[in-house]
Image (tube, rainbow, N blue to C red):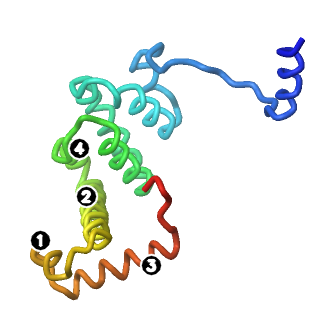
Amino acid sequence: LFKLTLRCNKAKFLPKFDYLHFSLNDFEDEQIANLKNTFLSTTAMLLKHSRGEKEKLLAIESFLIEKLKILESSHENDFISAIFYYLHSSTHLTLNEIVIFFTKVSTIVTNIAMTAIEQLREETISNVIRNLIQNGASMELISKSFGLSFQKIEEIIQKIKTLLIEKPLTATE
């Protein structure tokens, strides 16, 4: 009786919708590749292969190149960048291996990859500098460590302060 009451009380908080639960592994790559929506097929294929072995992801290289070309022709640069960041954060591929995918598409797609790499680099440097400052490192030590001028370090610190004002650090960061 208690379980039934609890289930009924919880039911009012659950949205009423239908959904399907399936594993992408239940689909052949060809089925996913033939989905008519480019975003859906690209995302599904990446999700299916990104957590596995590097060789399996490299095996879908031609698929990925084809989809990147379609996305480029549709001027979907933000989605192309998102693919780059996803591959970087969710796969066992090195940055060089990811860039190779992108360089096989076009100069524009290669430039998107290079911009993403530069943003990752700047983000990493900013995070390390923030941690060094929080631990009492001097400007001189930071400047020597990164080979950056005091002016550049000041710019990065100002950017960090601006970001902290916009989005304060939480206990988990």
For residue 74, above or below residue 15:
below
Q: CA distance from mark 2 to mark 3?
A: 22 Å
Q: Residue furthest front?
A: 136
In the rendered structure, which disc, 3 or 1, sits on the residue that comes first in sequence? 1
> Of label 2 and label 1, which has the lower sequence position?
2
| Three-letter residue code for mark 1 | Ser
- Which badge, 2 or 3, is on the more N-terminal residue? 2
Q: Earlier in the sequence, mark 2 or mark 4?
A: 4
Number of dots carrying numbers: 4
The residue at which mark 2 appears reads as: 117
Q: Amino acid at mark 2?
A: Ile
Q: Residues within 10 Å of mark 4 (few under 14, many from 20)?
A: some
Numbered disc in front, either 4 or 3: 3
Element type at marker 4? helix
70 w.r.t. 29: above or below: below
Q: Which residue is mark 1?
A: 145
Q: Nearer the viewer, residue 135 or 56?
A: 135
**Residue shown at 21% from the left, 24% from the top:** 55
Q: CA distance from mark 2 to mark 1?
A: 21 Å
User: Regarding mark 2 in the picture, which secondary structure is present there?
Assistant: helix
Disc 4 marks which residue?
98
- The answer to the question of whether label 2 and label 4 lie on touching residues, with beta carbons closer than 8 A, is no
Residue 104 at least partly seen: yes
Q: Is residue 72 visible?
A: no
The residue under label 3 is 162
Label 3 near label 2: C-beta < 8 Å? no
Mark whose residue sits in front, 3 or 1? 1
Q: Position of residue 53 (x, y in %)?
A: 26, 24
Amino acid marked by disc 4: Ile
